[in-house]
Amino acid sequence: MTSDQAFQAFETRKIFGSLNGLRALCVGLVLWHHSPALAGLEGGARILSRGFTGVDFFFVLSGFLITTLLIREERRHGAFSLAGFYWRRMLRIVPVYFLIVTGVGGYYVLVKGQWDLAPLLPYYYLFFSNMLIGEIPTLAPTWSLAVEEQFYLLWPLALTVLPRGAALRGAVVLGLIVVFVGVAAQVIPWFDPLETRHGRWQVPVSSFAAILSGVFLALVMSTRAGFSAVWILVHRRWSVPLLAVLLLGMWQVLPGVLLGGPNLLMHTVMTLILAGLVVREDHAAAPVLRWLPLRRIGEISYGIYLYHLIGLHFARGVFAPLGMTVETAPWLISAAFVAISVLMAELSFRGFESHFLKMKARGGGPRARPDHMKKI
């Protein structure tokens, strides 16, 4: 297959077949990061402590997919619908998010009587939990949802203002990445955070840099010339596995705290892996990433991510009457924690989220998304 043929296939592809598998691996990293089993391996190889980077990979993937959808809609209709974008985003993100925030918040405030947590709830409902100084138990994962919603409130607006052309938009995005990485590395001065009683208000520069890495890839691959450049780098069937090995090696040798240059290096490799997954469907990792159980985990990964600390809470409670704790039975409780989290997400997806996703698929709300874009 030539680069031109691959570009034509990429432009018309409705589904990127390996991305649900990638989502499953990302959420698996997060589950490992919070598992009791990891606590028992403290002091082991540094690579074992990198589960939190699953969120970084989610950010890169999100930036790529959202921007690709917006660019394709713009190309098809002459402009994309801001109202339509926010409507689709709301249907996917808000229902289960609000369900969990309301249920958990109500439990701790009304049932357990921890009224001091009540002032924190508006931060969660308004997607500012990443600014909180404290937190409501089991709602810690919502910080990354807040980051994404803050970014996607601004990014489509920026696209409507920026002149069209992938080169100019890409240059702006690349400049923002450099600035954010410099700020995170403390080599570029930035505003001091504004502190209030419950919050510390600042731009999440490291997280935005990860999302912008995916945005940059989408902009580059939206043109034939840019796609060709990416194709040269990652088009071989074994590019993805080799890059994955490189990423694993980096997790072991990079500093414990990933800020600035090390973070940029990691995000760059993640972006190249993502590029390798979408430039061709028959890459060497495809049989693994398209394995049906892994794909299903990827489909419900959003729910798994939101429910998993609740699942950990339940897993601890199940074994407590038997005298088992995270110290005495870390692997057993970890296995139960994963199983409970997946079960909760599956039930939530089938019985709750799917009703809203059907509204999204039917094209309800402001200007329906083109059919060829619904499945990406």
Image (cartoon, rainbow, N blue to C red):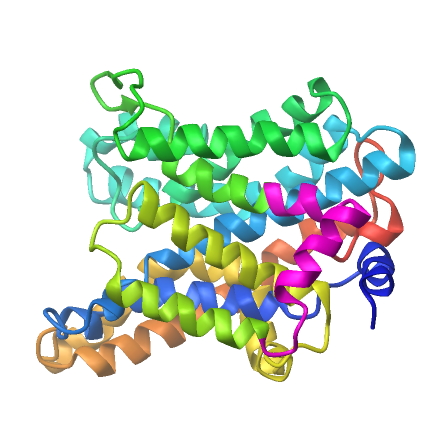
Q: Quadrant of the N terminus?
A: bottom right
Q: Which residue is drawn at 43% across and 57% down?
A: 305
Give whichever of 350, 189 is nearer the camera: 189
Extreme residue toward the right, this view: 77
Residue 83 lies left or right of residue 89; in this view the side is right
Give whichever of 240, 2 is nearer the camera: 2
Residue 221 is a magenta residue: yes
**Rendering coords of residue 170 (x, y %):** 64, 34
**Rendering coords of residue 329 (x, y %):** 15, 81
Residue 141 in view, yes or no: no
**Rendering coords of residue 151 (x, y %):** 52, 32
Residue 352 lies left or right of residue 186; in this view the side is right
Residue 121 is a magenta residue: no
Give the prevailing secondary structure in the magenta stretch. Answer: helix
**Rendering coords of residue 2 (x, y %):** 83, 68
Q: Is residue 62 above or below residue 280?
A: above
Q: Residue at x 62, y 65 (%)?
A: 234
Give whichever of 105, 187 is nearer the camera: 187
Q: Which residue is drawn at 69% across and 21% down?
A: 162
* Corner quadrant of residue 309: bottom left
Q: Which residue is drawn at 22% across and 31% down?
A: 133
Residue 222 in view, yes or no: yes
* Corner quadrant of residue 108: top left
In this picture, which residue range is highlighted in magenta? Answer: 216-238
